[in-house]
Image (cartoon, rainbow, N blue to C red):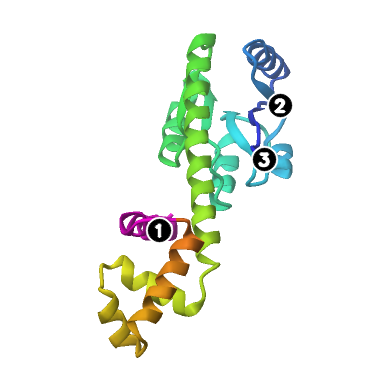
Amino acid sequence: MQIAQIVYVVDDDEGIREGLSLLLETTGQLVKSYSNAADFLDDYDKTMRGCLILDIRMPRMTGLDLQKKLNNCGASLPIIFITGHGDIPMAVEAMRQGALDFIRKPFREQDLLDRINQALLIDASRSKQQDDRSITLSKLALLSERERQIFERVAKGEMNKVIAHDLGISERTVEVHRSQVMKKLEVRTLAELVRFKLQEEISTLS
């Protein structure tokens, strides 16, 4: 089941929260707002999809503090900071820490909406990549130890007879295992098998 994207607004200014919520709801966006960073952090989990609109200056836990905590737990939600005129050095630091953008107060509504749309596209792309990685790893988990050996060597372009010789099995046995590997991974050609191996390597690095 696909998880809905939500725009999360974290700002200690009630007027800002209400104004942003109204603006976003009129454009058809799902919105959830918080008056402080700690409350959002209590709610956060890695399945959240959407983006985070975050005030940079808040009491107790600042926007930067929240960003660092989210980074430490591997969060992938794109963050757009809302900053005052005196917060630019902090905003630059937020960008270095991975924020998508920062918008200075007072801001044009359309500028914010454009950034949010960009953030949601990025989130959707990241979500698809995560789903693809999960599918790749779940299929690989179906392989037996011998099938895994065959998969690794076939993906490197080794011939069946070479694999058979090195593993001390018949060429026919290699062919049977190779057929099972392709069935479990749901690929039909050698090129697709090689691409699957590349996807696994990307998943391991991510």
Along the viewing direction, whichever of 151 and 123 lies nearer the viewer = 151
Q: Quadrant of residue 53?
A: top right
Q: Is residue 45 left or right of residue 159?
A: right
Q: Nearer the viewer, residue 110 or 177?
A: 177
Q: Quadrant of residue 182?
A: bottom left
x then y, percent, for residue 5: 62, 30
At 43% from the left edge and 74% from the top edge, which residue is drawn? 177
Q: Quadrant of the C terminus?
A: bottom left
Residue labelled with disc 3? 1
Q: Position of residue 59 (x, y in %)?
A: 67, 33
Amino acid, disc 3: Met
Q: Does 154 sit above or below residue 132?
A: below
Residue 127 horizontal side relative to residue 160, left or right: right
Q: Is residue 108 visible?
A: no
Q: How would you rate the neighbour count of disc 3 (Cα within 10 Å): few for under 14, some for 14-19, many for 20 or more?
A: few
Q: Which mark is residue 163?
A: none
| Kind of residue at badge 1 | Leu
The amino acid pointed to by label 2 is Ser
Quick check: 194 left or right of 64?
left
Mark 1, residues whose alpha carbon is within 10 Å: few (<14), some, or many (≥20)? few
| Residue 200 drawn in magenta | yes
Q: From the image, tell me which residue sits under label 2.
A: 33
Magenta stretch: give its range. Answer: 187-206
In the displayed orientation, state which residue is furthest to the bottom: 168
Query: Disc 1 designates what residue?
Result: 205
Q: Label 3, label 2: how many angstroms apart (C-alpha)?
A: 24 Å
Q: Going from the N terminus, do you reach mark 3 or mark 2 first?
A: 3
Give the structural element (helix, strand or loop) at label 2. strand
Q: Position of residue 47 (x, y in %)?
A: 64, 44
